[in-house]
Amino acid sequence: MYIGAKVRAIRKSKNMSLKELAEKSKLQIATLCRMEQCKMRGTVDSHLRIAKSLDMSITDLYQSVLQEEELKKTSAAAHSVFASNTKVNFQILSKNITNKKLLPLLISIEKGGKTTEERGPIGAEKFIYVLNGEIQIDIAGEILQLSKSNSIHFEASKPHFIKNLKDTASQYLSIMTPSNI
């Protein structure tokens, strides 16, 4: 089951309308509707807002999706792993992140893979450190290439996406200040 279908199921089990979820999460109804219809996946920030609005942690939201997709956890430490598409995997590196000020992620992008465009809330920041491979980051039209051991710190409210430039998987650490919901 995709994240949107799971959000819909949880929302309906709580007898919450789409309008109520939009108001609580401060997301547009159209965005939530597209997510629930699996026409878009949303961003980590939108997932955080939705989870908080549904009175659950983002880890629990992702875990329920993972259990239904029968994806394997990467370690005994039980960090949550989720896929935004077939070529991009995110691993949350901390527990109980909904009440924390930083969101640490380990992101792996397969050959030819690309993240969906993200745009954090105003004031949010993101730090990226490349562990393996080479990535290209597009921040509001400014294109930058980063290779192993390179890093960048930028304003996450600018639209941005990242793609892998190598013939093998690339990995990077991403630390973002999530929105205050």
Image (spheres, rainbow, N blue to C red):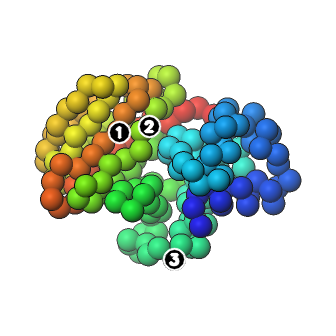
Q: CA distance from mark 3 to mark 2?
A: 26 Å
Relative to 181, 54 lies left or right = right
Type of amino acid under label 1: Phe
Name the mark on residue 150: none
> Dot 1 lies on which element?
strand
- Quick one: label 1, few (<14), some, or many (20+) residues within 10 Å? some
Quadrant in the picture for residue 180: top right
Do the CB atoms of the residues marked 2 and 1 lie less than 8 Å apart?
A: yes
Circle nearer the N terminus (3, 1): 3
Residue 120: percent from left, percent from top: 48, 32
* 105 relative to 63, above or below: above
**Which mark lies nearer to you, 3 or 1?**
1
The number of callouts visible is: 3
Is residue 70 or residue 152 the one in the foreground?
70
Which residue is denoted by mark 3 in the rendering?
Answer: 70
Which residue is denoted by mark 2 in the rendering?
Answer: 118
Image point 66% across, 43% down: which residue?
A: 32
> Dot 2 lies on which element?
loop
Which residue is denoted by mark 1 in the rendering?
Answer: 161
Image point 73% across, 58% down: which residue?
A: 10
Do the CB atoms of the residues marked 3 and 2 lie less than 8 Å apart?
A: no
Quadrant in the picture for residue 13: bottom right
Image point 23% across, 58% down: which residue?
A: 111
- Quick one: label 3, few (<14), some, or many (20+) residues within 10 Å? few
